[in-house]
Amino acid sequence: MIQQRVASIVLAFGIVAGGLVGVSAVTATEAAAASAPIKVGVICSCSGPAGIAFVQVTDGYLAWSKATNDKGGIAGHKIDVIEVNDQSTPGTAITDAETLVSDKVVAVMVSSIVQQAILPVLASAGIPVVGEAYGVAGLPQNTDVFGTTDTLAPASLSATEDVDLAKAAHVKKLGYLYETTAASTGLTTSELQAAAAKVGIKVVYSVATSLTETNYEAECIAAEQAGATGLIDGTGAPLNVENAASSCSLENYKPVYFVSAQNWNGISPALAKDSYMSSATAPPFDTSIPAIRLWRATVNKYFPGELNNPNLDPEVQISTYEGGLLLHDALVAAHLTPSEQVTSKLIVKGLYSLKGDTLGGLAPPITYQHGTTHVLDCWFESRQVNGKVSVLNGGKGVCA
């Protein structure tokens, strides 16, 4: 009887132990799956004519990934960033893209001046671009390029933005300084002239500039002599834009400036005097928006002092940061679980599930449509007068 009882206890213990072993095995399997990282690629033109600018804007995405990992990842999945530098060279960009494909990344954030070379490689592998900066219009086969700003929009949208701001400033004669590297894919003088003419504005002067320029006095003199009372300062990197305004000030030429978000660091008194800005993201200075405060806090934590760097383009850095938020929201929309494997298809499924997502207020409402190149044709507008910045249109986005 005693032996029988002992045998029963042993048997019962064996069953319980076996059950515990089984539970432990399942838990270990789930834990292993939960710890499987989400491999994402980052392609950056981190060296070349504007390498410094590219490094700093790409840090927005890296700051997001670090913060996300510190909070435990997305549904328990940590972000594994594989960063490559295409050196602003198409051939290197293709090689880098092929490397990321072989590394089995499931998404790529692109911050590249030569992304035309990259996109076909990623498209053929079925890997979506989730977030991109300094973009150019995607090739027809690249319907899986999911931007968060208007950087994939046609250049005509830039014309619409500039003309809308010129109307707000009551400017009737425009000058246009543009950077030559962007001229082949950016806004052309003829496109700007056509958009301006529709509302009675004339483009009286335009000229190509270079990233290597430091003095723009000749251009400023010519613009003033042509009668331009407003100047689109699109001379390239933030420091170029600042230098152009400073050069005009030296010539006592004081037009209304139309610039991008990169210039709201308050460095140039000329720009601070009277400038209008259109931005594809919520204005970087508008700390009334919780999402702007969070972006600033995140970058300050992982890249201290960077937000005060004169070479930083904060709007474009926000766009890379948004790329991370977009990936997060897509996976949440796809109902990612800790034990589920993250794939490109799952990410794309989640992206197409988003309806009017503003990424916490950083972006215009985002909804992607199947079978098309994704163009977001909305932007934010703001103004700076004597160093004081303010948002226009009640802080709401303006759409074409």
Image: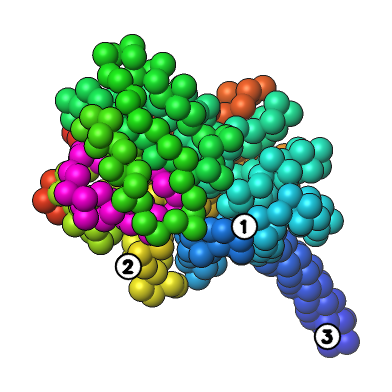
Magenta-drawn segment = 234-259
Residue at 56% in and 45% down? 181
Residue at 60% in and 44% down? 130
Q: CA distance from mark 2 to mark 3?
A: 75 Å
Label 3 is placed on what type of residue? Val
First-in-chain label (1 vs 3):
3
Residue at 78% in and 69% down? 25
- What residue did someone put label 1 on? 45
Is the C-beta separation of discs 1 and 3 under 8 Å? Answer: no
Q: Which mark identifies residue 6?
A: 3
Secondary structure under tag 3 reads: helix
How many other residues sit within 10 Å of disc 2, few (<14), some (14-19) or many (≥20)?
few
Could you tell me residue 251's position as x and y percent?
21, 50
Could you tell me residue 252's position as x and y percent?
17, 49
- What residue did someone put label 2 on? 308
How many other residues sit within 10 Å of disc 3, few (<14), some (14-19) or many (≥20)?
few
- Viewer-closest of 200 and 66: 200
First-in-chain label (1 vs 2):
1
Label 1 is placed on what type of residue? Ser
Q: Which mark identifies residue 300?
A: none
Magenta span contains residue 145: no
Could you tell me residue 280's position as x and y percent?
40, 39
Q: CA distance from mark 1 to mark 3?
A: 72 Å
Which quarter of the rendering shows the C terminus?
A: top left
